[in-house]
Amino acid sequence: MRPSTECRSSRSCAVAAAAKNPHHRATIKWSGERIMKFLDEAGLVGQPGMRWWKASHLL
């Protein structure tokens, strides 16, 4: 049994650890810069979906 009660499964613990890791966040942001530029030029990054783009940490 895990001592922490905030994780419901090993996957949720891993996701939480990755979300707190600054290197992981920087890698996600770096890897998404090119695709976000392309999507913005194509008009696919607009105000209605901005909340989801920010939640994905690509913006």
Image (spheres, rainbow, N blue to C red):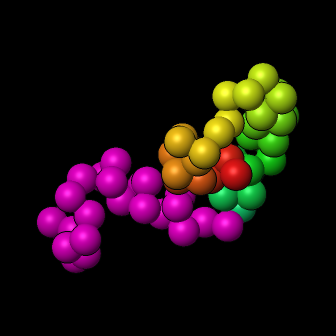
Q: Residue furthest front?
A: 47
Judge from the rendering whether residue 16 lies leftward or rightward of residue 11; answer left or right.
Answer: right
**Which percent across, then down, holds residue 59?**
70, 51
Judge from the rendering whether residue 59 lies leftward or rightward of residue 30; answer left or right.
Answer: left
**Which percent across, then down, holds residue 17?**
48, 63
Q: Residue at horizontal 59%, vertical 53%?
A: 54
- Residue 56 visible within the image: no
Q: Residue furthest top?
A: 42
Residue 10 versus residue 16 in the image, above or below: above
Range of residues picked out in magenta = 1-22
Depth check, front residue: 21 or 50: 50
**Which percent across, then down, holds residue 24?**
66, 56
Q: Quadrant of residue 33?
A: top right
Residue 20 versus residue 44 in the image, above or below: below
Residue 2 covered by magenta stretch? yes
Q: Residue at horizontal 24%, vertical 53%?
A: 9
